[in-house]
């Protein structure tokens, strides 16, 4: 049981480039999330999904896109990377929060845009 | 909108002693859940403890316990017999019952001195 896995662990992008952050979970969780963590700012929700084929925006969705074609996978797409997207990105998954109580987080991806 | 406030950006404690991390939240809901997460230097987010608002009894997990003051909207974390491995960022988080989203505080950096 690998839990939540994310790739890559580190990435440097030039301004205007695009990339996809991969996230996979093997716990059969319906709910999946993407957060970004900026220094001293806690975690901000980018997008989330309550099941395959269903996605919704969080607090800071601009500049990102997601898809959820399977229960296991929830990739995050950055189009036209900007320096403001330099951050650490966390994928997470869960059962409904009021039933399970907790998110399972991946190890994070450190992204630098220069 | 719900908010979570951690007023102590940094705290320190001597090994084997007790430390309390503060968290307050703002909500008009009666059905909600509160969490403390630990983020060590590895960046992995780890659930420490969970509290349901409808439960009057304070949650405990081994050396970790909470002081949940519902009327004051306060949810502090007490770490007893602090160990070097407790050094980490600690995040307080809130979710409304039935919601898919967690709201995080900005975190408290805990240093444990030998």
Image (tube, coloured by chain):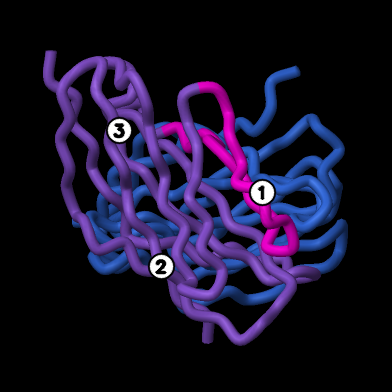
Chain colours: A blue, B purple
Answer few, some or many: residues within 10 Å of disc 2's Cα (few below 14, many 20 plus, some between 14 and 19): many
3D distance between C-alphas at marks 3 and 2: 20 Å
Whether residue B50 is visible: yes
Q: Which residue is mark 2?
A: B24
Chain part drawn in magenta: B44-62
- Which is nearer the eye, A66 or A58? A58
Q: Earlier in the sequence, mark 1 or mark 2?
A: 2
Q: How many labels sit on residues? A: 3
Secondary structure category for the residue under label 2:
strand
Was residue B49 drawn as part of the magenta stretch in this picture?
Answer: yes
| Residue B79 picture location, percent across and down | 37, 32
Q: Are marks 1 and 2 on the same chain?
A: yes
Q: Are marks 3 and 1 on the same chain?
A: yes
* Subunit under mark 1: B
Q: Which residue is mark 3?
A: B88
Q: Is residue B102 left or right of residue B92?
A: right
| Residue B11 picture location, percent across and down | 17, 42
């Amino acid at each position: 049981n690998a839990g939540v896995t994310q790739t890559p662990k580190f990435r440097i992008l030039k301004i205007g480039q695009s990339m996809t952050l991969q996230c996979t979970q093997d716990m059969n969780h319906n709910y999946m999330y993407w957060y970004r963590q900026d220094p001293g700012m806690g975690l901000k929700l980018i997008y989330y999904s309550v099941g395959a084929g269903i996605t919704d925006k969080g607090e800071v969705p601009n500049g990102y896109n997601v898809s959820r074609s399977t229960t296991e996978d929830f990739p995050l797409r950055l189009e036209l990377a900007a320096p403001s997207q330099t951050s650490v990105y966390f994928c997470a998954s869960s059962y409904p929060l009021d039933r399970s109580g907790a998110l399972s987080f991946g190890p994070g991806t450190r992204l630098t845009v220069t | 909108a719900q908010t979570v406030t951690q007023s102590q950006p940094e705290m320190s404690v001597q090994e084997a002693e007790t430390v309390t991390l503060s968290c307050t939240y703002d909500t008009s809901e009666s059905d909600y859940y509160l969490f403390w997460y630990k983020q060590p230097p590895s960046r992995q987010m780890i659930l420490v403890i969970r509290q349901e608002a409808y439960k009057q009894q304070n949650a405990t997990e081994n050396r970790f316990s909470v002081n949940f003051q519902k009327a004051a909207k306060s949810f502090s974390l007490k770490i007893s017999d602090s160990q070097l491995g407790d050094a980490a960022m600690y995040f307080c988080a809130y979710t409304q019952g039935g919601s898919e989203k967690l709201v995080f505080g900005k975190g408290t950096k805990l240093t444990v001195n030998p």
